[in-house]
Amino acid sequence: MDHFDRLIVEQIPRLRRYARALTGDVAHADDLVQDCLARAWSRRHLWLRKKRLRQWLFTIMHNLHVNALAKDARRPGEVPWSDGLTTASVGPGQDARLEARAIVEALAHLPPDQREAVLLVGLEQFSYAEAAAVLGIPLGTLMSRLHRGRERLRALTSGEGRPPLKRIK
Amino acid sequence: MHGSGHESGHEPGRPVTREELHAYADGTLAARRRAEVTAYLESDPQAAARVAAYRRQNAALQEAFDPVLDEPVPARLLQAGRDRRAARWRAAVAACIGLIVGAAAGWGLHDTVVDRAAGLEELASRTAVAYTVYAPEVRHPVEVSAAEEPHLTAWLSKRMGFSFRVPRLGDLGFRLIGGRLMTGGTQPAALLLYEDDRGRRLAVYIRRDMPTGGRSELRYTRHFGIGVMYWTDGDRGIGVSGDVEKDELVAAAHLVQAQFMS
């Protein structure tokens, strides 16, 4: 394993976390990560001139994801999102767990562009400028998607700041 | 972004923007501005509720998905892309199994109309398999090498049943290595392999037992991580595959298509 491999392997858990949240499906998410890693490896010569490996990897994954969505859109009947991921979301506190479940459900109802903005900032903690670079959009567009996404999540999980108490069957 | 509390005594300064509320919630607002926004939020319960909601969203996302960080990484991801030849062989084996299963499943339907989409899908898959199996071969990638091109052309023309000309991909830096006979669905098929100066290879797969007539558009897909461009022209099905950038693959497909039509 060389230096590049080690750096990439370090990023795999975070790539998986993001892909899981993005697609809502364990197998689909890992396929996305695998494609991302394969592409990163085949383009390693392009990375050596850059510094920010994590941002570069997320950019690759974003592009693959967008391509996959475009492909799915041409094949109606295939729903890209399944909610088979809540198995991963078991935390200790009951309230925290309910909020986590509610946000996972709500995420499925966000348009993909808003979902990406919310996840890159809120989950992956990229700076706004980095998130905009990953998505290949201007900063203003990123902020607008982030705002709409967060407001939509807020509306979906509860009204006006009350904790989401909706029970999930 | 300033609501009802605007006049109620916080440091006036600049109005607080929507973007600043997000930055405040994300903890990325500059320290000096932070105090001003804190004061503003005390006077605007609605804005304060938003900020609180954004923070709870971030916490809930982390609660929901941070456990993924602690999951063991699947071996296939640790391998991804590093041992490329082995990966190709694994993909080839998987693809062959898929074809066998697909063929077995399709046999029961062989008297019914063959679905055009399924035919195209199979064309793409066979192209990817052909590339995956033969492109990594160092010593025996082809049966007849480019040095014997007249023989290659005559042989493939005879077996394929049409006057066959080898497409030129020199404009893209790819030269012919040679070709081999393959299996199509019901008739022989041909595989041509090309290589560029960097050792990258391209496969062109041609068959003439496609179930449908007419000319399809060029399509792109990926099989087992390998890009494929494929289309039909009458009973001919043509696929171009290789581990190259997509735009190169698209260019190669257009070159091949133009030369096969003429």
Image (cartoon, coloured by chain):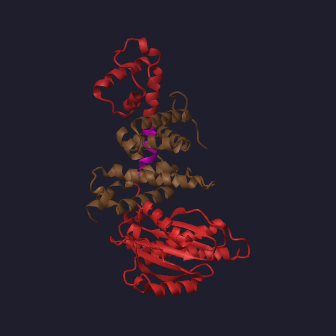
Front in this rendered view, residue B79 or B171 = B171
Q: Position of residue B40 (x, y in %)?
A: 39, 19
Q: Residue at x 45, y 73 (%)?
A: B168
**Is residue B208 left or right of A49 when viewed as pictured?**
right
Q: Residue at x 43, y 81 (%)?
A: B178
- Magenta segment's dominant SS is helix
Front in this rendered view, residue B249 or A65 = B249
**What count of labels does the image hold?**
0
- Which colour denotes chain A? brown
**Is residue B222 left or right of B118 when viewed as pictured?**
left
Q: Quadrant of the C terminus of chain B?
A: bottom right
Q: Residue at x 46, y 28 (%)?
A: B50
Q: Position of residue A138 (x, y in %)?
A: 40, 39
Would you say residue B48 is visible in this rendering? yes
Is the residue B56 above or below the residue B168 in the image? above
Q: Quadrant of the N terminus of chain B?
A: top left
Front in this rendered view, residue B236 or A130 = B236
Q: Position of residue A91 (x, y in %)?
A: 45, 45
Chain colored red: B
Q: Residue at x 63, y 54 (%)?
A: A76
Would you say residue A92 is visible in this rendering? no
Extreme residue in the right direction: B112
Q: Position of residue A65 (x, y in %)?
A: 48, 53
Is the residue A43 above or below the residue B179 in the image? above
Q: Is residue A74 magenta?
A: no
Front in this rendered view, residue B73 or A40 = A40
Magenta stretch, residue numbers:
B57-69
